[in-house]
Every structure is written in C-alpha cells, then in structure tokens.
Amino acid sequence: MEVISNRLKSELVGKKVKRGSESEIIISSLRNVVKTILERSTSTEDLLEKIKNSQRPFVIMFFGANGVGKTTTIAKVAYLLKKNGMTSLIAATDTFRAAAQEQLEYHANKLEVPLIKGKYGGDPSAVAFDAVASAKARRYDVVLIDTAGRMHNDKDLIEELRRMVKIVQPQEKILIIDSLAGYDALEQVKAYDRAINFTGLIVTKADADVKGGIILSIAAELAKPIYYLGIGQDYNDLVKFSPEWLIPKLLPNN
Ligand SMILES: Nc1nc2c(ncn2[C@@H]2O[C@H](COP(=O)(O)OP(=O)(O)O)[C@@H](O)[C@H]2O)c(=O)[nH]1
Ligand SMILES: [Mg+2]
C-alpha cells in the first residue's frame, strides 16, 4: 500500500539507528503509521450520542452491495437502539426483491420494531418518505432505511439511490462493507462515495477476517468514520471500531 510505505519512509528517514535495533525501530515506526491511519477513521463522536443530540426522527440510510450484511446490520442497530432506550422504525425499500423485505420483516417482528414496506415493484423513494413521515407522526427516534444492493456500478440503481437521498435527506448515509470482499471492497467504497458521498461506514464479518487488512485499506483511502464492526450473526455482534481492536490483528506478536 503506497500510503503506508510512503509514511513509513518519512518516519524512518534521518532516524539514527543503532546496529541490531533496526527491526525494532521499523516495527515501532510501522505501528505508529498504522495507528495514525486508523485514527483518521475513528469517529470522534459516538453515533448513539449524535442521535441523542439531534432532532427527531434521526434518519439513517444504509447502502451496500447484496450480501455484505446490510439487513443483518440494520437489525443489530435496531437492537442497539432499543438497548439504549431509543425507538426505531425500519423501512424496506428494495421493492423488487421479495426475499429482502421478508428478511427484514423477520427481524422487525423479533425485535418488535415496526416495518414500513412497499408494494412489489413500487417506488423505493416513496417507501422511505412514508417511513420518515410515519416516524414523525408516531414520534419515533430513529428511521433505519434499507436500500437495494444490486451492483454498485448499476447506473439505474445509483440514480435511484441519489433520488432517495434527495427526497429523504438522511442525517447519516452509512455504507456497509464486507471485510471478506477483498479488493472489490475498495472499489465499492470509491463507487458509493462518488454516487452518494456517504458519511460513515460499518464493516461486517470482521470475525471471519483474521488479518483485518481491508479496514486498513479503507482507512488509508479516505478519512471517514468507521462506526462499528460486525463480528458475528447475532444482534449483539456489533462493536465500536477502535484502532486498539485492529492493531494486534494487523501486527501480531509484538
Ligand atoms: N460472520 C458474520 N456474518 C455476517 C455478519 N454480518 C452479516 N453476516 C451474514 O452475511 C449474510 C448476508 O447478510 P445480509 O444481511 O442478508 O446481507 P444483505 O444482502 O447486505 O442484506 C448472512 O448470512 C448474515 O448472517 C458478520 O458481522 N459476521
Ligand atoms: Mg438485505
């Protein structure tokens, strides 16, 4: 990774190094570089605090390719909100995939959170708009909007998502990235950034990603907060992101 090697070079250039302590110095410099990069992605403001301090309803839209864990993550966030005494309402806007709506319905029922959905083939923006109106009328704290995740380079989908953002004006636009997606994850980050200029990220399946490399790549690519990591399939498996969590994975044994 270019950013890392460049920064490492500038950390090391001009450093006086005693013979025999070279590797020690390099590793501690590398640790500093990695920490600095990851800190750019560490949110200074906790998402829950932000919601508490904002006007209601607080609207969060979730984006991401199919299979990255959008629906699961939305269920986890609804659970987290509930645990923290906040009410939420979920909007299922993927009106073309019946299975997507059913999956959300399953979680919504389990979590006892209302779900707003549209007719098959209906306008996704209308579903999102209705959900926000409903949350206002019923005084819900948060609206969680699930969106369709067809290919990130699908022009129609991008237009649809942009339109939804324009109509709904969410306070947060969160991109979900699968840490197992490899190089494609970075391509998704760039494509969604161009399309909807997301405000933050949640990286899923960190439990299955032994090395945590994709998180470092994302952090090196852009300075946007990673709010949470998904670390399993249960509602509780959502942890706040911190460099301290990741650094031992990236640089083990020292
Ligand atoms: N191990 C693990 N699996 C996850 C995590 N998040 C989601 N999944 C699984 O990934 C699969 C796809 O998730 P889903 O929410 O349907 O993705 P969507 O298509 O983006 O809505 C499901 O089997 C989830 O249980 C995570 O953090 N860790
Ligand atoms: Mg889904």
Image (cartoon, rainbow, N blue to C red):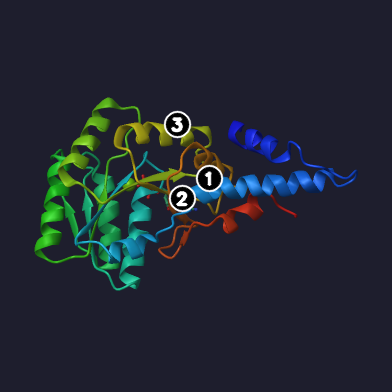
**Mark 3: amino acid:** Glu
Q: Secondary structure at mark 1?
A: helix
Q: Looking at the picture, tell me which residue is in the foreground, 178 or 100.
A: 178
Q: Secondary structure at mark 3?
A: helix
Q: Residues within 10 Å of mark 1 (few under 14, many from 20)?
A: many
* Dot 3 and dot 2 residues touching (CB under 8 Å): no
User: Does mark 2 have its CB less than 8 Å from ligand 1?
Assistant: yes
Residue found at x 39% / y 46%: 176
Marks 1 and 3 sit apart, C-alpha to C-alpha, by 13 Å
- Which residue is disc 3 drawn over? 187
Q: How far apart are the alpha carbons under marks 3 and 2?
A: 16 Å
Q: Which mark is residue 204?
A: 2
- Report whether residue 118 is seen: no
What separation in Å lies between label 2 and label 1 (alpha carbons)?
10 Å
Label 1 sits on residue: 215
Tag shown at residue 2: none
Residue 87 in view here: yes
Give the residue at the far left of this rendering: 137
First in sequence, mark 1 or 3: give its number.
3
